[in-house]
C-alpha cells in the first residue's frame, strides 16, 4: 500500500511505513472483526453500509482466488521459509500482538471447537468468541457461497476492574460466570447485571500461519 500525500510504502500486516518520508512510522491498529451481515444489522441497525453501486464496474461479490484457503495449498505470493512440519502454511490462525510485545496466535479450529477461549497474554486478560454464520471470502468463486467459517471476535475480558470468565451457550451467545450476564458476538451485554455494557474490542489478525510466522517469528501458536 502507498499513501498519496508522501508516496510512502506501507506494510499491510504491521501498518508500518517501510519506504519513503514516513519510514518507521506505524499506523494505529483498529479492531475490525469480519462478521456476517445479519450480526452487523442486528447490533448496529443504524449503521452505514457501502453500496456496490460505487460508480465503478467491479465484481464485488466475486473471489478471484477460489480455493485459496484450502489447507493443502501453498501460498503463491510468498517466497519465505515454509518448512514447518507441524503446521501447514495455510493453517488459518488468529493472532494478537500488543505494543509491549506480548503476542499469541490460535488455530481457528481450536477457537471453533471451543466457541470461547479465556486467555491471558502476559498481564492482559482477553476472551475470544466464535459464532457460526460467516462465509469464507477465499473459498468459493462466489463469496456468498463460501463455506461457513464463522465469526471470531476478541475482547478485553475486564469490566470496571472485574475480570470475567465466559462460557459459550451454543447459540452464538455467551454468559460470564461472575455475573450471569448474557453477551453477543459484538461484545455487548444483552441482559443481566451488566446489561448494555460493552467489552473493549482488541485489534487482531485473522490470517494464515505462514504470514503470522513470517512477521511474528517469536510468537507461539496454540492448537
Image: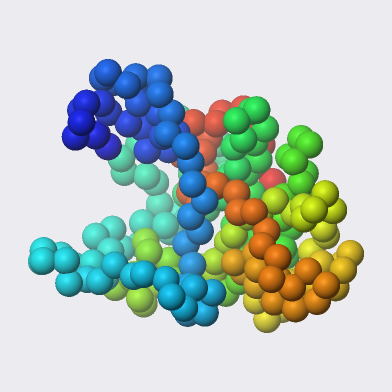
Outermost residue, right side: 178
Residue 86: x and y in percent read 61, 42
* Residue at point 34%, 70% (across, down): 49
Residue 6 in the figure: left or right of residue 154: left
Q: Nearer the viewer, residue 189 or 69?
A: 189
Residue 221: x and y in percent read 65, 42
* Residue at point 19%, 34% (across, down): 4
Q: Nearer the viewer, residue 46 or 93?
A: 46
Residue 216 in the figure: left or right of residue 122: left
- Is residue 80 placed above or below 184 in the rendered structure? above
- Is residue 80 placed above or below 146 in the rendered structure? above
* Residue at point 55%, 47% (across, down): 203
Residue 164: x and y in percent read 82, 58
The coloring applied to the image is: rainbow
Q: Nearer the viewer, residue 180 or 46?
A: 46
- Is residue 180 placed above or below 34 in the rendered structure? below
Residue 176 in the figure: left or right of residue 30: right
- Is residue 179 placed above or below 85 in the rendered structure? below
* Residue at point 36%, 32% (across, down): 11
Residue 76: x and y in percent read 31, 43
Displayed quadrant of residue 23: top left
Amino acid at each position: 500500500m502507498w499513501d498519496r500525500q508522501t508516496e510512502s510504502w506501507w506494510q499491510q500486516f504491521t501498518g508500518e511505513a517501510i519506504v519513503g518520508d514516513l519510514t518507521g512510522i506505524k499506523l494505529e491498529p483498529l479492531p475490525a472483526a469480519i462478521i456476517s451481515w445479519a450480526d452487523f444489522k442486528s447490533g448496529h441497525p443504524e449503521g452505514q453500509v457501502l453500496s456496490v453501486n460505487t460508480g465503478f464496474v467491479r465484481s464485488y461479490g466475486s473471489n478471484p482466488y477460489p480455493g485459496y484457503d484450502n489447507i493443502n495449498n501453498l501460498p503463491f505470493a510468498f517466497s519465505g521459509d515454509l518448512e514447518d512440519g507441524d503446521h501447514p502454511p495455510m493453517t488459518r490462525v488468529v493472532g494478537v500482538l500488543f505494543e509491549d510485545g506480548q503476542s499469541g496466535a490460535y488455530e481457528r479450529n481450536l477457537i471453533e471447537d471451543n466457541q470461547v477461549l479465556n486467555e491471558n497474554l502476559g498481564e492482559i486478560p482477553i476472551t475470544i468468541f466464535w459464532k457460526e454464520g460467516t462465509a469464507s471470502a477465499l473459498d468459493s468463486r462466489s463469496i456468498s457461497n463460501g463455506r461457513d467459517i464463522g465469526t471470531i471476535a476478541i475482547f478485553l475480558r475486564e469490566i470496571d476492574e472485574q475480570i470475567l470468565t465466559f462460557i459459550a451457550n451454543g447459540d452464538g451467545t455467551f454468559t460470564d460466570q461472575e455475573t450471569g450476564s448474557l453477551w453477543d458476538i459484538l461484545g455487548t451485554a444483552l441482559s443481566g447485571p451488566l446489561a448494555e455494557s460493552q467489552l473493549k474490542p482488541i485489534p487482531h489478525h485473522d490470517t494464515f500461519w505462514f504470514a503470522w510466522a513470517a512477521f511474528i517469528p517469536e510468537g507461539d501458536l496454540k492448537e
